[in-house]
């Protein structure tokens, strides 16, 4: 969680939503900024060896990330999360270790990564 928090602005909201899934709400973010932050996080995780206590060899860890923006017409939190989740599963289904963006319509300035 701390590694995740270090990659975001002070007012962004990272949270664990269950299992190995996290969400980051990024108010007032453009799509290109959200994707850039997500890609930087993906790259840092892939480059960092993780050591499980007791193991001698570090393990490689990758992350798949779905990015979605709120629609201009408004979204519920559930709608935004569902679109980010769909993008996440597309990332997983297309080879993992990648960032995928949900289809973009006219959007407000709120991103979920």
Image: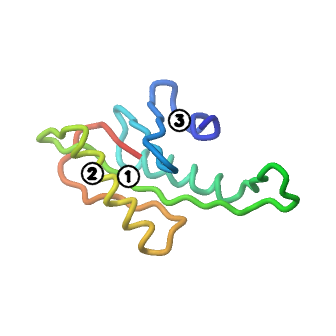
Q: Considering only order in the chain, which callout, 2 or 3, is on the residue closer to the N terminus?
A: 3
Q: Identify the residue shown where x is 35% and y is 32%.
A: 27
- Compared with 97, 106 (above or below) is above
Q: Identify the residue shown where x is 39% and y is 59%.
A: 88
Q: Quadrant of residue 66?
A: bottom left
Q: Are marks 3 and 2 in contact (CB under 8 Å)?
A: no
For label 2, the residue is: 82
Residue mark closest to the camera, 3 vs 2 = 2
Q: Please, which residue is most extreme toward the left here?
A: 73
Give the alpha-carbon distance from disc 1 to disc 3, as whole Å: 14 Å
- Rendered location of residue 76, percent (x, y): 19, 38
Give the structural element (helix, strand or loop) at label 2: helix
For label 1, the residue is: 67
Residue 14 located left or right of residue 4: left
Give the alpha-carbon distance from disc 3 to disc 2, as whole Å: 22 Å
- Rendered location of residue 34, percent (x, y): 42, 46
Residue 32 located left or right of residue 82: right
Q: Identify the residue shown where x is 21% and y is 46%.
A: 79
For label 3, the residue is: 8
Give the structural element (helix, strand or loop) at label 3: loop
Give the alpha-carbon distance from disc 2 to disc 1, as whole Å: 11 Å
Dot 3 alpha-carbon crowd within 10 angstroms: few under 14, some 14 to 19, many 20 or more: some
Dot 2 alpha-carbon crowd within 10 angstroms: few under 14, some 14 to 19, many 20 or more: some
Residue 61 located left or right of residue 24: right
Quarter of the image for the N terminus: give it: top right
């Amino acid at each position: 969680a701390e590694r995740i928090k270090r990659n975001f602005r002070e007012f962004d909201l990272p949270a664990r939503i269950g299992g190995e899934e996290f969400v980051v709400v990024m108010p007032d973010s453009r799509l290109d900024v959200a994707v850039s932050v997500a890609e930087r996080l993906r790259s840092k995780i892939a480059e960092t060896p993780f050591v499980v206590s007791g193991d001698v060899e570090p393990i490689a860890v990758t992350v798949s990330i779905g990015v979605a923006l709120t629609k201009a017409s408004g979204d519920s939190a559930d709608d935004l999360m569902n679109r980010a989740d769909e993008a996440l599963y597309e990332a997983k289904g297309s080879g993992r270790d990648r960032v995928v963006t949900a289809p973009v319509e006219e959007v407000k300035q709120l991103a979920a990564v």
